Each structure stands twice: as C-alpha cells, then as structure tokens.
Amino acid sequence: MVIGLTGSSGAGKSTICEILKKDYKVKIINADKIAKKLSRKGTNYIIDIIEKFGTDIVDEEGELRRKRLAEIIYTDPEKRKELNNCTFKYIRKEIEKQIKKEENSDNTIIIDAPLLFECELDKLCDKVIGIISKRDLQIERIVARDNIDYENAEKRLNAQESNEFYISKCDEIIENDNDIFHIENLVKQIADKYKIEKK
C-alpha cells in the first residue's frame, strides 16, 4: 500500500513520520529530501533552475542559495508556480523509482510531500492523510525550525494551502495540536485501519 502524507509547513508531518518509522514497517519517501538531493551542483534540475531564475540563486561554488530562492518564490506567486512546475517532474520521477524498488517488500510506503496534490503524487497513492494544526502553532514551529522571524514564517504559511483544503481532499485528517501521546494514539488508529504492520 502507498499512503500519501501531506499538510502545510509546520503542521507536524515529520513528527508523524518519526512515529511511523519507530513503530511500524514503513518506507518513508520524503519529497523535500529528494528535492534537496536533486538541487546539488551540476544536476539537470539545478541547470534548469538557473536558466529560469538566473545565476543569482547559486553561490560562488555553484550550490543553491535556498534562502534567496525562498525569498523570490514566497513573494511572487508566478515565480513559485514556475519553480513548482520544474521541480515536480523531477521529484515524481524519483519517487516512482523508489516505489518500484519496494515492490517485493512488506513495507507500507509513505510519501511525505507538502505539495502532494499539486505534484499529482496523490495519483500514486491508495490513501492520503492530511496533517493539520493551529496556525499560531505552525508559525511557532516554522520560526524554531528554520531560524526565521515571525513575519517571514507567516509569509510562507500564507503562500500555502489552508487546513480546509486538506480537510476537503484527504481521506484522513490528523490534528497535530496535542501532546505526543495523543498523536501516537491517532497514528495507531490509522495504522490499524489501513493494516500497517507493526515492527
């Protein structure tokens, strides 16, 4: 079974993945990690990005300046759309490859992707779980995780889909506002429902 895990920044997808990885037979495919790997110096992806956004988005060593790119895409919706369209095709290809590798495994495959629907990765999934959280809590988490100020964290969140979007499109919703024991219990309920094997 392939399960998609999605939600906006700071909702707590990583927390859910950690619980699943600790207790269940799963293979986590992290779309953000794939994107980082693809954006290393000299890859076809980074060459495409430089063509679209200019040499200013890489440093003197040819490595991607992530903060600079984030500044551009979180203030210009057209640029964000352009980046996403370029990124999605590379990510999807790599995820399809990783799913194929797991064909003979008894692992449940979890695709952890904030832009799961936008990237059309939901078409690879049997079920999709949305992770949502209170907005203020999400902003706090983004500030702590990315070492940015409140205003920039808010801008990032404003550029993403609302909780209502995930509620309307996902098969299951996990509200990640409570303590870890409560969250673990919610994960257990979903794991039982979809017969994800325990370790």
Image (spheres, rainbow, N blue to C red):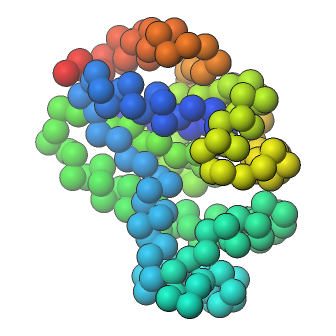
Q: Nearer the viewer, residue 30 or 181?
A: 181
Q: Is residue 4 above or below residue 192?
A: below
Q: Position of residue 100 (x, y in %)?
A: 25, 52
The N terminus appears in which quarter of the rendering? top left
Task: Say how many tags the image has.
Answer: 0
The answer, for residue 12, to whether it is visible in the render is yes
The quadrant holding residue 137 is top right
Say whether residue 167 is left or right of residue 123. right
Q: Position of residue 88 (x, y in %)?
A: 55, 63
Residue furthest to the left: 104
The answer, for residue 168, to whether it is visible in the render is no
Say whether residue 57 is left or right of residue 188. right
The C terminus appears in which quarter of the rendering? top left
Residue for point 18% across, 32% down: 106
Residue for point 47% across, 42% down: 112
Residue for point 64% across, 18% down: 177
The quadrant holding residue 193 is top left
Say whether residue 6 is left or right of residue 93. right
Q: Position of residue 150 (x, y in %)?
A: 81, 44
The quadrant holding residue 83 is bottom right
Residue for point 53% across, 34% down: 13
